[in-house]
Image: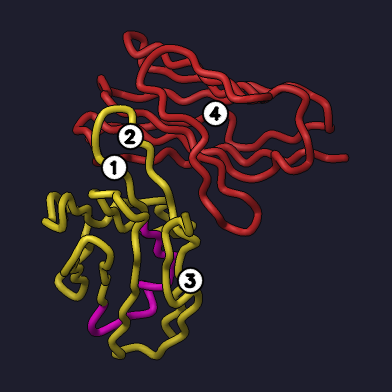
Chain colours: A red, B yellow
């Protein structure tokens, strides 16, 4: 099956810093989503982005499907950005495979 | 909208007991997903439904697990008999199942502990 690799596994930053999270996948996909799991366990969808670039406030994402990777950018980090960020992909429409996540800690 | 609703939020049971987890998807969504999250295996898709019909159950770990969706607004995941290794957080998610609406919306999860 499709493999998803996220890097880095852990990232610790000061408030106000910028960060880039990477997601590599092993096969062509028609569905790619980024999620944030907050410290209380809630999973929030950030982007549905099988290709191209999207922006939402301080967050943006880019997927280069031909090169099988996606990037999530977080600018001017806030403590509320802390948590685990997951990339999930599917080569068959809805059957998402999740990466192991990047744990982001933003210190005040 | 109330979002995806799951119950119970926490369940503690003893090995061998039957466990039933419940999910109400977002109104109007026609695809529903059950996931399991553990430290060892991360987030795994167990089964998903489209228009109340199971489409892919290849992630269901074994016959002790079963899922149903009797109507568009309700689904259950049942474990019988439960074992300690079933301890995990179980998430339900839903979406509209088409085009840009492949975006999945997750419920708060049910934390299951099997003693």
Per the image, the residue denoted by label 3 is B111
For the residues marked 3 and 4, what is the alpha-carbon distance in whole angstroms?
27 Å
Question: Within the image, what quadrant is residue B4 found in?
Answer: bottom left
Quarter occupied by the N terminus of chain A: top left
N-terminal-most mark, 3 or 1: 1
For the residues marked 3 and 1, what is the alpha-carbon distance in whole angstroms?
26 Å
Could you tell me which chain the residue with mark 4 belongs to?
A
Could you tell me which chain the residue with mark 1 belongs to?
B
- Where residue A104 sits in the image (x, y, percent)? 67, 38
A65 horizontally vs B51: left or right: right
The residue range painted magenta reads B79-92
Per the image, the residue denoted by label 2 is B101
Per the image, the residue denoted by label 1 is B96
Mark 1 touches mark 2? (CB < 8 Å): yes
Q: Look at discs 3 and 1 and give the one toward the viewer.
A: 1
- Where residue B94 sits in the image (x, y, percent)? 33, 50
For the residues marked 4 and 2, what is the alpha-carbon distance in whole angstroms?
27 Å
Mark 4 touches mark 2? (CB < 8 Å): no
- Assign a secondary structure to mark 3: strand
For the residues marked 1 and 4, what is the alpha-carbon distance in whole angstroms?
30 Å
Task: Tell me, for residue A7, which label it has, or none.
Answer: 4
- How many numbered discs, if any? 4
As for residue B80 lying within the magenta part, the answer is yes
Tell me whether marks 3 and 4 sit on the same chain.
Answer: no
Q: Residues within 10 Å of mark 4 (few under 14, many from 20)?
A: some
Q: Look at discs 3 and 4 and give the one toward the viewer.
A: 3
As for residue A17 lying within the magenta part, the answer is no
Residue at image position (47%, 30%) is A47
For the residues marked 3 and 2, what is the alpha-carbon distance in whole angstroms?
28 Å
- Assign a secondary structure to mark 1: loop
């Amino acid at each position: 099956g499709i493999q998803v690799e996220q890097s880095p596994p852990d990232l610790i930053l000061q408030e106000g810093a910028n960060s880039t999270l990477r997601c590599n996948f092993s096969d062509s996909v028609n569905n790619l989503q980024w999620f944030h799991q907050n410290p209380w366990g809630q999973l929030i969808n950030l982007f549905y982005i099988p290709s191209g670039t999207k922006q939402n406030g301080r967050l943006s994402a880019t997927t280069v499907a031909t090169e099988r990777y996606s990037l999530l950018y977080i600018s001017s980090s806030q403590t509320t950005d802390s948590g685990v960020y997951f990339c999930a992909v599917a080569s068959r429409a809805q059957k998402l495979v999740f990466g192991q996540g990047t744990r982001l800690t933003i210190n005040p | 909208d109330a979002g995806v609703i799951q119950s119970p939020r926490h369940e503690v049971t003893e090995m061998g007991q039957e466990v039933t987890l419940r999910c109400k998807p977002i109104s109007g969504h026609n695809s529903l997903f059950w996931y399991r999250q553990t430290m060892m295996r991360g987030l795994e898709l167990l089964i998903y439904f489209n228009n109340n019909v199971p489409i892919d159950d290849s992630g269901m770990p074994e016959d002790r697990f079963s899922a149903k969706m009797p109507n568009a607004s309700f689904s259950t995941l049942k474990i019988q008999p439960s074992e300690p290794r079933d301890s995990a957080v179980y998430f339900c998610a839903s979406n509209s199942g088409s085009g840009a609406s492949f975006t999945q919306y997750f419920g708060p999860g049910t934390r299951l502990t099997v003693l």
